[in-house]
Amino acid sequence: MDCCEWETTEYKGIIDSGKSLYHYNSAMKEYLHQYKFLQDVALSEVFATLLKEQLRDHSSVIVPIPMNEAKLRVRTFSQVDRLLDAASIPYTHLLGKREVGIGDKPKLERMALQDVFWWNGKPVPEKILLFDDVYTTGSTMRLAAKVLKDKGAKEIKMMTLIRA
């Protein structure tokens, strides 16, 4: 592991702390391209042992960041769900995602987005760990966490595999 853990100041009151396991570099760029865009789902096994170790004693409910339906049809699998499945980590879907390509937008547009996620109606636990594959600007996590806070979550932490 070569990355970082941090306390958030930018999202104070929404996200309590965060952790990424790796920095984005050329090797991670190749991995993500092969995994997500060339649909090499077998690569979900690469980080299974590490994810299992990192999440085994976690007391929060793990909530993966969802894909919108259109992107899911194109990719054929949810890369975030498959990472957790490969590590045998239980998780709960509490969010849906509208068809807004956050990653396709410039940084300032991503930071200004609202209403990207919607609550799916399942009970919201007090302690949540949001999980995603990549952290870039933090917009995805902020928007997802805000929906869950508005529905009663008291503590939200986040974890990503990679931080850009």
Image (cartoon, helix red, strand yellow):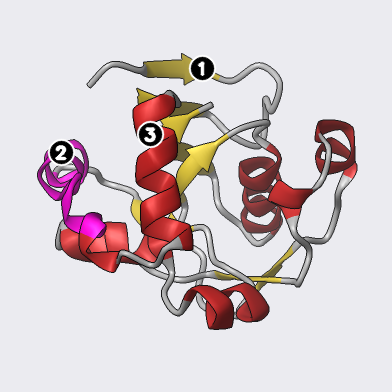
Picture coordinates of residue 91, whole percent (x, y) = 32, 65
The label number, if any, that marks residue 28 in the structure image: 3
Amino acid type, callout 1: Glu
Instruction: Identify the residue at horizontal 15%, vertical 38% (top origin).
Output: 50
In 3D space, how far apart are the residues under numbered discs 2 and 3 (Cα atoms)? 15 Å
Secondary structure, mark 2, is helix
Mark 3: give few (<14), some (14-19) or many (20+) Cα within 10 Å. some
Mark 2: give few (<14), some (14-19) or many (20+) Cα within 10 Å. some
State whether residue 39 is above or below residue 13. below
Q: Nearer the viewer, residue 70 or 139?
A: 70
Q: Earlier in the sequence, mark 1 or mark 2?
A: 1
State whether residue 114 is above or below residue 164. below
> Is residue 100 visible to the viewer in this orientation of the structure?
yes
The label number, if any, that marks residue 50 in the structure image: 2
Picture coordinates of residue 92, whole percent (x, y) = 39, 69
- Tag nearer the camera, 3 or 1: 3
In 3D space, how far apart are the residues under numbered discs 3 and 1 (Cα atoms)? 24 Å
Secondary structure, mark 3, is helix
Q: Which residues are magenta?
A: 43-56
